[in-house]
Image (tube, rainbow, N blue to C red):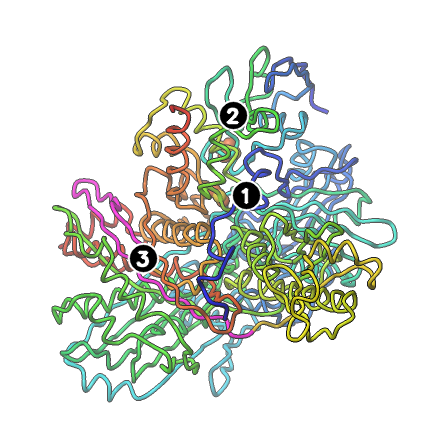
Amino acid sequence: MPNESSFKWVGTRQIRPDGPDKVTGRAKYAADYTMPGMLIGRILRSPHAHARIKSIDTSKAEALAGVKAVVTSADFPELASEMSPNSEMVIDFSDVSNNVMARKKVMYDGHAVAAVAATDAEIAEEALSLIDVVYEVLPHVIDVEEAMAEDAPLLHDGMITEGITPTPTKPSNIAKRVEFRSGDVDKGFAEADVIVERTYKTAAVHQGYIEPHAVLASAAEDGQVQVWVSTQGQFMVRAFCAKVCGLAISQLRVTPAEIGGGFGGKTVVYGEPVAVQLSRKSGKPVRVVMSREEVLRASGPTSGGVVETKVGAKKDGTLVAVDAVLKYQAGAYAGSPIGPGCMCMTAPYEIENVQLIGYDVVSNRPKVAAYRAPGAPISAYAFESALDEVARELNMDPIAIRQKNAVKEGSKTVYGVTFPRIGFEEVLEAAKNSDHFKSPVPEGEGRGLACGFWFNIGGESSAACHLNEDGTVTVISGNPDIGGSRASIALMVAETLGIDYNKVRPIVADTSSIGYNFVTGGSRVTFATGMAAINAAEDVIGQARERAAKIWEIDVDAVTWEDGEARPAGSNAGDHDPMSLADIAKMAPKTGGPINGHGSINAQGAGAGFGCHICDLKVDEGTGHVTVTRYTSIQDVGRAIHPGYVDGQLQGGAAQGIGWAINEEYVYNDDGLLQNAGFLDYRIPVASDLPMIDTVLVEVPNDRHPYGVRGVGEVPIVPPMAAVANAMESATGVRMTSLPMSPPKVLKALEGS
Amino acid sequence: MAKKYHVSATVNGDPVEFLCSGQETMLDVLRDRLELTGAKEGCGSGDCGACSVTVDGRLICSCLMLGVEAEGTSIETVEGMADGDQLTPLQRIFLEEEALQCGICTPGVLVAAKALLAKNPDPDETTIRYWLAGNLCRCTGYDKIVRAVQKAAAEMRA
Ligand code: FES
Ligand code: FES
């Protein structure tokens, strides 16, 4: 690994390449795209939580002047079950298809049943009202534990729980059971001096990106389809649209627009295949943009969950046993993040005896999508709350108990991985030394602390590095840039080539202009795609050295690359003037033609990330309103390539977690209909809800990356819920075991105490 | 086809004329009729501030105003903020302070912050937080936005 002090660009705060466009309104997001002759697509959605579709009559809508196409599930091929990796989760293509357009049954309030394309929005809306759907309303179930009950209404007649032997004979709403185990929990609890046993509940919450899903599709007569879309993965959109619409991959060209937030929620498709089919049917470009209400009713969210937790410790704070049962909502189709939820629950600690049993449970809610460290915040809320209670019983400092049990290099996780060099001990040390932790707790307030873990992923990435005629460079990669990845990639390429950051221009290419890239997810882009870009830059360096060798008529091994120039080395040192990238670019036509580098990898060795958050808050005992007064987020970030945007990840994740802790939840009525499908009632934190969020970047480089990168985007949403709950107990003496800690719930808890 | 109304207004200093139906919002008009897509629709219900513009100097959510109400008014959007090819201090400092991640909230936040600084050149943190409470940002946690506004205010006062 290069010596840190020698870095010229890595670790500096440069202006992001897409910046000027984003402060002038010039940046093009998907809903900003138009085409001549473009139609407006609108989707008709189920008014029921669970119902059989008896019939759909679209004839009146089709007859309306200005309506150019109407589609229902009859316009999409029926797909057999086929699993596909999707962000950190897996997804069944047949479920994707049925979620995009309901077939036979609607599974939740807001499920798409039909769509129209018309010459303007008003006509499209009118056409929706003319579609006649006859439903037979079925009994529904919203609550995860009620859905697991023997006599619960069944969503899928053929759902037989996976992961149980012998295989159950009767269907249920439990899609899957998973189990992680090490040691012997009975033996562990027998050794324990204190045992805390509690059930913690979390509500379903939405990713809450400010930009609703948007797509423009344009199909041509030869079967080629172009798509412009707000997505975390243009290659995912290509693959999913191909499957759901019955096309070959080569028939689709998908261009990612600037993306207005995703947080995992844009790693799947909703309106995209609908726009494609409407365009194919009408022969015109069709734009489908969701309303906020549609976003909340029909996209995302992440699971709510129930986590039964039992933790045992010895007097000296040694954790000896954990036994937990985790029940996660999957929404209407299988596939909650129950696996990652279990994996991350106890991962920061060495605990000999652990048993974690998880259930993936369907109910009449929108299908969950990934949300920042999917699954981990739910289980970490439970475990880090229970750990806080253990520390209180033992009269131990919250950092000391964590230091006593912290994982380090060589520690083995319950899911079977042995940690390489990680930075959890350094994070705890930094927390202990932080201004925040060392300062006294203000009068009338409470302080809480909690930690979090995310494994991060690598995966497939492609990048190209083109040397331009004047020695500047274009870097082409294939991951939508949500929070500054173009800047971080350009910084690493500038560092590698030894040229000025401003001479490197990064772009995010469409699916036909760069090789395959897995989605922007798992905190993988700066790590994996960054590594592909570094490889592409090194390929350019290799070719540049060859060209210099050719010009100097010496062996390529006798040419080194230093400070952005080729230099003769060894016995030839000093014989020739060094050649810069610009000199070599100028000579390229005479020395073999254009110089273009490529990098294609399946990146392994994503470094695990750990964080520790400290929260101060006060509670208004009259209203139950919680105000966070001070907050610090400390994290091992491997190496901060662009420290400003790394800070931003730590701050944004903490803010989302505070919202999850205090405000956010899906509220259903007795008919299973969502009651708060708008930003007024689904209340995400606003500027006046939050204090400044201080950050401490701990840098323990990941030795599997040329610049030491660890993913940073997901860890920060894991600790906040428990940090807030632990601070609540300090402030009020009341332990909140159910999220959100909203004013009515807090008031009730205070009254009961 | 819904009846259309003829409207004349000033947008970013230029006279404009457009036809719109009685149902179209000012946001629809800006985006679909005047090709000014800087203002964004995050909610359509006045809750997110992504569509913020000023009308005769007053900060509003353009999704809550009808296009026909624009008659005779002067409207400013993010597209009119920069001075030729020069970013204003507020815009430049937003970049220097990394006050945006995805950038979808940014046009609305900039328009709102500019309106604040026009009224109050030296707002404290609490004032900024309450003034921007109608502009949702899901990415940044607001920390860097608040700092950028403070820094821009200081530079503009100097
Ligand atoms: S779009 Fe106008 S306030 Fe959200
Ligand atoms: S930067 Fe993404 S919503 Fe503000």
Secondary structure character of the magenta stretch overall: strand
2 and 3 marks in contact (CB < 8 Å): no
Callout 2: SS: strand
Residue tagged by mark 2?
Answer: B53
Find numbered disc 3 in the image and state the secondary structure of the residue it sits on. helix
Mark pair 2, 3: CA separation: 36 Å
**Is residue A674 in view?**
yes
List x then y, in percent, for residue A423: 36, 70
| Membership of A683 in magenta stretch | no
Disc 3 residue type?
Answer: Met
Camera-near label (2 vs 3) is: 2
Who's the residue at 40% across and 60% down the image? A304
**Which residue is drawn at the image coordinates 67% and 61% (left, top)?**
A578
Residue A707, horizontal then vertical, whole percent: 50, 66
Q: Position of residue A727 (x, y in %)?
A: 21, 55
Quarter-of-image position of residue A306: bottom left
A87 and A20: which one is in front?
A20
Q: Which residue is mark 3?
A: A721
Q: Which residues are magenta?
A: A604-632
Q: Is residue A188 left or right of residue A111?
A: left
